[in-house]
Image (cartoon, rainbow, N blue to C red):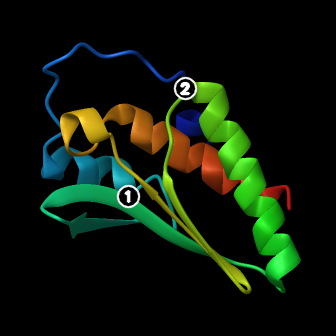
Amino acid sequence: MKELAHMLCIPFSEGAFPMPENQCRRILENLPGWQLVTEDGILRLKRTFSFPDFSNALAFTRHVGELAEAEQHHPEILTAWGKVTVTWWTHSVKGLHMNDFIMAARTSELEMHQ
């Protein structure tokens, strides 16, 4: 996971295609706790993080938001009492791109610093 977290997000051209599911599954092996889910016909990376209370969950949400803004790549974030669910995918390719895996790894690193 550390290797993924230290990779740079790369720009991609219009008309890019999502990564094939078999490639996604191989990379997913490096992201403990993350799962591949299909929602609205689109493959996504999803993970729920647990916290002792709402305040810590909200702080984590803010950190994920700051990370997303820095890279201009934004996840879906659901914050609730004691948990935050983060879902990454690339809207423009209607699926997963390497940047999603990089951002998932960085999101996991944020949890370690809570």
On screen, residue 63 above or below 111: above
Q: Residue at x 49, y 24 (%)?
A: 9
- Determine whether the residue tagged by mark 2 lies in a helix, strand or loop: loop
Residue 73 percent location from the top left of the image? 50, 34
Q: Nearer the viewer, residue 79 or 19?
A: 79
Which amino acid, mark 2?
A: Met
Residue drawn at 42 percent across, 65 percent down: 46
Specify the amino acid type for callout 1.
Leu
Q: Quadrant of residue 93?
A: top left
Mark 2 or mark 1, which has the lower sequence index? 2
Q: Is residue 14 left or right of residue 60?
A: left
Q: Answer with left or right where residue 76 lies relative to residue 25.
A: right
How many numbered tags mark residues here?
2
The residue at which mark 2 appears reads as 7
Instruction: Read off the residue under disc 1.
Output: 45
Q: Position of residue 105 (x, y in %)?
A: 56, 47
Q: Residues within 10 Å of mark 2 (few under 14, many from 20)?
A: some
